[in-house]
Image (cartoon, coloured by chain):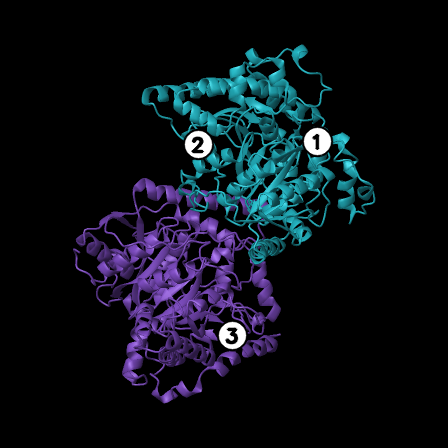
Chain colours: A purple, B cyan
Amino acid sequence: MSINWERQAQKGKDILTNSIPKQWLVAAEKLPPASQKSVVDFPRQSGLLSTRELIITDMSATSLVMEMGKGALTAEEVVTAFLKRAVIGHQLLNFATEFLTDEAIARARELDEYYRRTGKLVGPLHGVPISVKEHISMKNRTCNTGYVAWVDKVYTEDSLLLQLLTKAGAVFHVRTNQPQSLMHLCCSNNITGTTVNPHNRTLTPGGSSGGEGASMGFRCAPLGIGTDIGGSIRCPAAFCGAYGFRPSSMRNPCTGLKVASSGQETIHGVVGPMSSCSIEDLELFQRAVLEQEPWDIETSLMPVPWRSVAPTREMTVAIMWDDGCVRPHPPITRALRHARDKLVAAGIKVVDWEPYKHQHGWEVISALYYPDAAAKQRELLAESGEPARPLTEWALSYSRSNALSHAETWSLQEQREIYKDEYHALLKRRGVDFILSPTYSGVAAVMGESQYWNYTAIWNIADLPSAVFPSGLTVDSKLDALTEHDKKYIPRDAADEREWRKYQGPERYEGAPIGLQIAGRRFKDEETLAAAKLVEEIVSRRVDAKL
Amino acid sequence: MSINWERQAQKGKDILTNSIPKQWLVAAEKLPPASQKSVVDFPRQSGLLSTRELIITDMSATSLVMEMGKGALTAEEVVTAFLKRAVIGHQLLNFATEFLTDEAIARARELDEYYRRTGKLVGPLHGVPISVKEHISMKNRTCNTGYVAWVDKVYTEDSLLLQLLTKAGAVFHVRTNQPQSLMHLCCSNNITGTTVNPHNRTLTPGGSSGGEGASMGFRCAPLGIGTDIGGSIRCPAAFCGAYGFRPSSMRNPCTGLKVASSGQETIHGVVGPMSSCSIEDLELFQRAVLEQEPWDIETSLMPVPWRSVAPTREMTVAIMWDDGCVRPHPPITRALRHARDKLVAAGIKVVDWEPYKHQHGWEVISALYYPDAAAKQRELLAESGEPARPLTEWALSYSRSNALSHAETWSLQEQREIYKDEYHALLKRRGVDFILSPTYSGVAAVMGESQYWNYTAIWNIADLPSAVFPSGLTVDSKLDALTEHDKKYIPRDAADEREWRKYQGPERYEGAPIGLQIAGRRFKDEETLAAAKLVEEIVSRRVDAKL
């Protein structure tokens, strides 16, 4: 059995190995030593990219499109620059599952030809390289979703989302890694292995869109695509110092996403954008998708166009310091204090958010992840004989030992709806527009330790649009040391203790960026991104305290 | 056991009996004989209602509101007139489960007082009496959903829909009957018995909103509220010569509707309006509900306001003569021909509709009605010990003998989504805006015979908005006689044979109105009602052939 699964897994690994454009591979001796934790400065320091390539790969999608619209950049040079950076990134972080070099360059040339012929861009994402989480299926390519059993499963169609992005001008140049089962807040499987965090390679990039997290953190693409049913876009964005958006469910098209339990609707996962650069790019992505009216093809989506919303300071932001279950680590609390001070100084109304039954919310959503006692996942593991990774075991432990009956499932679904309605009513009653909170109990977790989902999963059950952005702060060996007061903290329960004990001190998390999460009211996706843009600008001091 | 359930059932019957306003009860000898089939002319012929009351009860909700707005009618006299007519209707049809006389009159007086004080109406449904299907729960009242086990279950809140309608000015004066389990296209339970059709009391009013069908057919209210998961609004509207609308799912609020399998989402039922008078009234209802943004309370609803859409002749109407499974009875085919001729004469583009895998659609939806092998329904029957009605047995026979596994359920859900998307794509590809079709294989079924759901259920799985309106024709003893050609019809299978054999000839269906159904594209609720209005006007000759 074990020989068997390893031979299967090798096929998936071969797809990756064979796809790497050899001309851009960096000789091992030119790479930083394995012991070097942060590699984010390597592209600049190594001299492997030209100045022009460094400038290009530092630009946002919005800026790239603008420059291509002026004829100042070609799609081909943009895609090539990001491909080169992605190859380096892959050597350092193991974030890719497949490079799409030839197709990406051919497509870029087509776009350039179109621009030369017409003087126009094909769409709002003309020439923008986008990295794509592997389980978003592509025509004539395998799609393994992190399962060895699926390594040679080939699909005949692009996912609907990719079709729309292609029409908008996007170029897909690299597919990215995900954990076995898709249900880890990390990125490790038995096919292409483990992805690491560009800011500190002893830390996880998060997950399940962990390859995307690394791709964004290392700027292997200005935009990426992740999926999120419990934090899988937001956690890697936060861990890697990037941006991510979990739209409301039933907004972005999910046709063609491959998951173990296809057709399951107990909790709706979403697909959404990640960005290396800005909230503005997340908005660009959303607009490009929704202006194509995907609900006219995937008819369960909400028929709601993307609205233009300007940021406003006339809002109330509530800060959730703690979810009442698991105490955030010192760097997170420091970033929230920093944000509070900045927002208050900028004249924003800031209040505290008292969490509403988050433990109950977690009990409902975690039971609804696996109503079948994870039978589908276990079947897929058994099919190849691959061993379960430790965090797969952890995630599967959320499920009860026996499948829920239909009656139990329906009762939980009813509780889910009640909780969602109650959370929305509470926001209205308290007059709160946005909740600023941790994305996770800590910064990027030490490999294997990312176990607490509920700072993100809570917005999946409440179905609140939520965006993650970097606070501009990173873990600080002095500011984030445990105080005497911290050391006396008495955890509320075993989970709180488990998470709190992990911190130990800032040393374990050297260089880790501190991301924050902002959630808006139900359906207020546009307002949430607009607010995130303003809040991020204020928090990271990029605008004056007063406009 | 049997004494027990009968004692329980009697409680429900007592609620009804005690609620009937005795002052308006008609002495038995003044009622038409039990053998008289049609009673629709009884209010006019009997002299029991004044001329003014007859005029009022013949008016549409739209007209009533207009007259109340001018001060030409009071809410109290409107509600009183409908209450009187409803009492007569109940004596003839057994359609009510509870009269709300005192509350309705008190509420009407409040509305009149408000109007006197301000010169304004409280809302778009000011003073409009609305009959309400029993399982739509009301504050401080029982709600049995057709189950003996629930006869003394009292609720503490009005359903959200009723709260919104109350704000819009509506007055609820009578609650109406439904079949045991809610899953019959007829209206018979062990509590308040069997409702009959006002046009022919040997026929069923349809179901499951059968009390509403009778209420509309006898004009016991200008508007009613039904629910529909397989045809339960549209079938009774068609059977009773009335109007009904199945909106897209996730549009009207369902919070507070009591069903056996609360929290089940395999197929989303909907709640929607029925009208005794006009499509315009259905639109009035929808606008009044959606302008209150129910999605801001029931947050899974689509955040889509009701749009104003004017009818247009620039449309393509496809006629579905037969669903490829069960051949419609002669009166239905005659009404479709009549409609086709009228529409063509009016310059509307009319084509034929080739049905798309309706048998497959039925297999998917019928399996998804009872993934638990109807365990919840059977439990509720067992709880009281009441016997299952024959059509309950019929409906439960759709379920397999064992509960579906989660994997099977998810696979069916996936097939449901694919089918829905494919049906929508087909409408677009064929350039068809609306499908005009039978609502049922025949006109109102003989009691106990309404077994074929798929002329309506197919639009539940495809989730197409669909409206029913009277063609203006009724069964004709000559025109609808079986022809020699008809007599030679060789049914396609057992279901087709079962349904075709029921017809026998027009005599069984004397006086039955012939309703037709029009379905629009996904999400085009507003366009569907606008088209239904125009089509109905053309088909029933109420407008000229050319505008």
Judge by depth and name the residue closer to the eye, B72 or A374.
B72
Chain letter belonging to callout 3: A
Kindly indicate whether the residues beneath marks 3 and 2 are on one polypeptide chain. no
Please report whichever mark, 2 or 1, sits nearer to the chain's N-terminal start.
2
Q: What amino acid is found at the position of numbered circle 3 in the picture? A: Ile
- Secondary structure under tag 3 reads loop
A53 lies left or right of B193: left
B197 to the left or right of A197: right
Q: Secondary structure at mark 1?
A: loop
Residue at (24% x, 59% y) in the render? A334
Q: Which mark is residue A191?
A: 3
Disc 2 residue crowd, few under 14, some 14–19, many 20+, Cα 10 Å? some
Mark 3 vs 2: CB contact within 8 A: no
Q: Quadrant of residue B87?
A: top right
**Badge 1: chain ID:** B
Q: A265 or B445, which is in the foreground?
A: B445
Residue pointed to by mark 2? B163
Q: Nearer the viewer, residue A90 or A194?
A: A90
Q: How far apart, in angstroms, are the residues tagged by discs 2 and 1?
A: 35 Å
Where is mark 1, residue-wise? Answer: B387
Frontmost of labels 1 and 3 is 1
Q: Foreground residue, A425 or A193?
A: A425
- Residue A408 position, x and y percent, is 56, 45
Which amino acid type corresponds to the residue marked 1 in the rendered image? Pro
Image x and y of residue A238, in percent: 34, 63
**Label 1 in the same subunit as label 3:** no
Q: State which quadrant residue B411 falls in.
A: bottom right
- B317 sits left or right of B107 in the view: right
- Report the chain holding disc 2: B
Horizontal and vertical percent position of residue A297: 52, 58
How many circles with numbers are drawn on the protein? 3
